Image (tube, rainbow, N blue to C red):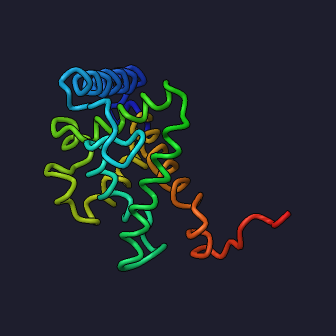
Amino acid sequence: MSSAAAGVSRRGVLKLGLGATAFLSTAGLTASLSGCSSGSAATGFSVLRASDLPFLRAAIPVMLDGALAGDALQSAVDQTLHSLDHGLARLSPEMLNLTQQLFDVLAMAITRGPLTGIWGRWESADAGSIRHFLERWKNSSLNLLRQGHSSLLQLVLMAWYSRPDAWAQCGYPGPPKI
């Protein structure tokens, strides 16, 4: 089926991409100016803010699905949050700002609903809804959402698999002893 038959033109795709970029940039700026995006870290963290934690606490178990179960999963979420915080603290200011803008967009109700399909609070979202949101972003026609999915997945998985206690879960014996 040709793009003309589908009613999609290059100009239309570019307009949609530009509109989405403007929407997300405006949302991030609005969050920063409205105070939704607090610059101070949550208690016990260097970089992660209190507004980032509900999303991360809901999404990390879905992203680590199958790696652990039960009580070990809750401990893994906490450990992953601290590893993620440690990694974010070492990012360049520009990369940290972009990451925090992504977290702001996911935290704000006005952007969370339309972009993720999660209309309520993250604490109330079930694993299936979060999995659907991640798949939607992964397969989105908008490059910005695909990049957001990739960034989230890489940040969380690097935070989890950088921990020695995660190595045993995947059969990695650890780095060679020198």
* Looking at the image, residue 170 lies above or below residue 91: below
Going by the picture, which residue comes out furthest to the bottom?
70
Going by the picture, which residue comes out furthest to the left?
120
Locate residue 90 relative to residue 37 in the image: left or right.
right
Looking at the image, how many numbered discs can be counted on the residues?
A: 0
Going by the picture, which residue comes out furthest to the right?
178
* Looking at the image, residue 15 lies above or below residue 166: above
* Looking at the image, residue 154 lies above or below residue 79: above
Residue at image location 38% in from the left, 59% down from the top: 60
Q: Nearer the viewer, residue 19 or 111?
A: 111
Q: Which percent across, then down, holds residue 83?
A: 50, 53
Q: Which percent across, then down, holds residue 105?
A: 28, 36
Q: Which percent across, then down, holds residue 108?
A: 20, 37
Residue at image location 37% in from the left, 65% down from the top: 61
Going by the picture, which residue comes out furthest to the front?
44
The C terminus lies in which quarter of the figure? bottom right
Locate residue 127 relative to residue 164 in the image: left or right.
left
Q: Which percent across, then down, holds residue 59?
A: 34, 57
The N terminus lies in which quarter of the figure? top left
Residue at image location 54% in from the left, 28% down from the top: 92
Residue at image location 18% in from the left, 24% down from the top: 34
Q: Nearer the viewer, residue 116 or 95?
A: 95
